[in-house]
């Protein structure tokens, strides 16, 4: 069961545009002060770096990801999530669209 | 002065992807029940139809727009807004990025 809606947030109105628009997100601040973003990755193969630890939650579509130092591509779909350590990176490949929530640790 | 943040909203986590990703938005519901979306249009020339009346507010970047039935292209930048009637359309051309809030009437 994926998270379809997040309530009680402040949204930054200017989008974050990465990789020439292959990834677009909007930043959120929750009532408890925690930060998230909601975004979408279009068909592509990309590498993302992390500052804070992240939990990437798939809310629609899907992707395959590979954590830094791993050879394994792992498929995720709606309701799935994966953790990425701080100061690390992950590869992602998307065939159609990958809609996600990024929960910052 | 453009609106940099909108507080106290519910955000739909799945993005709206239009025109093969040239326009991506996330839908919001405000505390008073009104609906908005925050989105970005990448470099392109597109035509959008409306159902409800809309106010398009530029929060970053810019565009030129032309309302249905008009010959005039009008340039907008951060802090500018334009109204589009219900059941109408408008053309938009974007050279870089157009970050917007769409306020539905």
Image: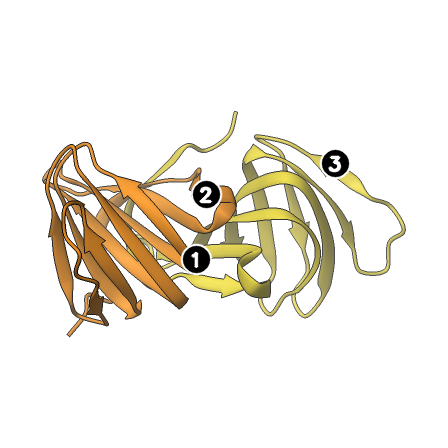
Chain colours: A orange, B yellow
- Which residue is nearer to you in this view: B33 or B82? B82
Query: Residue at image x 43%, y 57%?
Result: A44
How many neighbours does mark 2 have within 10 angstroms: few (below 14), some (14-19), or many (20 or more)? few
Is B5 rendered above or below residue A9?
A: above
Query: Residue at image x 44%, y 37%?
Result: A14
- Distance, label 1 to label 2, CA atoms, is 10 Å
Q: Position of residue B94 (x, y in %)?
A: 68, 43
Is B46 rendered above or below residue A105?
A: below
- Which residue is nearer to you in this view: A38 or B29? A38
A77 sits left or right of B62 in the view: left
Residue that mark 3 sits on: B75
| Residue A44: numbered disc | 1
- Distance, label 3 to label 2, CA atoms, is 26 Å
How many neighbours does mark 3 have within 10 angstroms: few (below 14), some (14-19), or many (20 or more)? some
Is A37 rendered above or below residue A66?
A: above
Q: Position of residue B35 (x, y in %)?
A: 42, 58
Q: Position of residue A105 (x, y in %)?
A: 9, 40
Residue that mark 2 sits on: A19
Q: Are the residues under marks 3 and 2 on the same chain?
A: no
Q: Secondary structure at mark 1?
A: strand
Q: Position of residue B18 (x, y in %)?
A: 55, 64
Q: Secondary structure at mark 2?
A: helix
């Amino acid at each position: 069961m994926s998270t379809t809606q997040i309530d009680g947030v402040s949204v930054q109105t200017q989008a974050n545009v990465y990789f020439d628009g292959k990834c677009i997100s909007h930043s959120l601040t929750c009532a408890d002060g925690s930060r998230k973003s909601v975004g979408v990755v279009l068909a592509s193969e990309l590498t993302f770096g992390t500052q804070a630890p992240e939990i990437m939650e798939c809310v629609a579509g899907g992707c395959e990801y590979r954590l830094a130092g791993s050879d394994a591509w792992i498929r995720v779909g709606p309701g799935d999530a994966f953790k990425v350590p701080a100061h690390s990176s992950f590869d992602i490949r998307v065939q159609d669209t990958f809609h996600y929530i990024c929960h910052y640790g």
